Image (tube, rainbow, N blue to C red):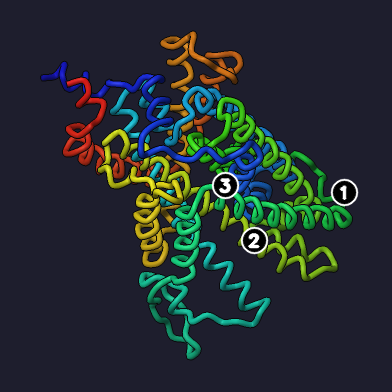
Amino acid sequence: MASGLAGDLTRTKSLDQLNSDAEGGEHKLARTLGPWSLVALGIGAVIGAGLFSLTGIAAAEHAGPAVVISFAIASIACAFAGMCYSELAGMIPVAGSAYTYAYATMGEFVAWIIGWDLVLEYAVGAATVSVSWSSYVTRFLRDTLGINLPPALVHSPFETYKLADGGMAHGLVNLPAIFIIVAASALLMIGIRESARVNAVVVLVKLAVVAVVVGVGLFYVKAQNYVPFIPENTGTFGEYGWSGIMRGAGVVFFAYVGFDAVSTAAQEAKNPQRNMMIGILGSLAICTVIYIAFAGVLTGLVHYDQMKGDAAPVNTAIAQTPFPWLRSLVTLGVIAGFSTVILVLLLGQSRVFYSMSQDRLLPGFFSKIHPTWKTPYRSNLFFMVFTSALGGFLPISQLGHMTSIGTLLAFMLVCVGVIILRRTQPDARRDYRTPLVPLVPILGILSCFAMMVSLDGETWLRLLIWLAIGLVIYFAWSRRHSRVGRAAA
């Protein structure tokens, strides 16, 4: 019995079987995405609120103007994982990202854990971002257009707001949060090509906003704000000095979370052996340049110690220029950033569930492809309802921390997968090869684990509870219905 259970948990899918499943049958997805569509997906997922919030926090509390070095260090850690993702995405151009890679290398049980874990990164992450999107849209409509939405309809039932007479009241539902989830899900159902086009347009809008802020702000930078470039450590680890730069890298790392969502679209990419590498590493490189440029201008406009406790450091920095309209432009950039993050996260989640459903670890309902749109529309519908309910009715700000720990766990397993496949499938086709294996994957594992360890105990507890729920589902249903298990029986 024990050996049978162990065999069930470690059963894998071969590379030939994975690629065969991707290219045949009624569940085939349409390959329509070129390299620049994939790069745009990566930028759409990465450039979000982190650009406008984490930069000021990391500079004020940890690194000072040297926050630009923190961004560079964080990008190197991401690059380790990105190179591993690129190799596996080219070898296994199948939807599902880290879940699929784990199934091919570490077995069904680990694949289930990472697939369940990715719900934290994608679905819960999209719900969290939708609440922030609602807040910025409400503010933009009020301050720019003079439109005041009813407070009860922009707050969840668990949130309170101040009445005109000074009293407090509970909200009813966060309608804007529901709206953006429904709109993004509808777009994804209609087609991946259409979704990619909309994403590309919105990405151009937010990059244009960032370019204007950096271009205009550059003329009002004060050289004295860069002195000292690396503030002297206060005697406490993480407060300035090189330890502060490293702590800052840990903070801003989470601004990069999302580029891995590109790999979930591998089954819809044209020439994935070449284009996945361009999409993953290309988007990561572009986002790194944007982050460093933005951080450099921000700390040049305002001295880092003036941003302590500032909830909107970018607005404070823009106040140093004679252009108040830039504030509205920044708000527009944040809204655009949030919109594409939600779109790409929902794309990733639906593709992970599609793959798990194909393997019958989840009901076949989720892998049904629409005959005209060629998308897993039922999976999109499910997460439209689930995610919009979270965004509309729950105060899920704390759940946002779960997206980070879920992402780091996925990064680690992908790095492990590269090492395993180099040993078990040394002759398999690899159009892109991660350099210096096993050194690069090991560095990726260590850097991600170090950041996981730095997270608080409550975040770890929530992860363990979530995984425990997943284990109940796996042993109660998924293990008995597994397609690979039934084929081996």
Side of 471 relative to 28 (left or right): left
Side of 221 relative to 385 (left or right): right
Determine the CA span between mark 3 and mark 1: 33 Å
Q: Which residue is mark 3?
A: 45
Q: Is residue 176 above or below residue 458?
A: below
**Circle 3/circle 2 CB separation < 8 Å:** no
Q: Which residue is mark 1?
A: 223
Q: Quarter-wise, where is residue 292 in the image?
A: top right
Provide the secondary structure element on which disc 2 rests. loop
What's the residue type where badge 1 is placed? Ala
Q: Which residue is mark 2?
A: 310
Q: Is residue 152 above or below residue 59?
A: below
Q: What residue sits 32% from the left and 34% below the top? A: 113
Side of 245 relative to 372 (left or right): right
Q: Quarter-wise, where is residue 313 in the image?
A: bottom right
* Camera sees residue 148: yes
Provide the secondary structure element on which disc 3 rests. helix
Quarter of the image for the C terminus: give it. Answer: top left
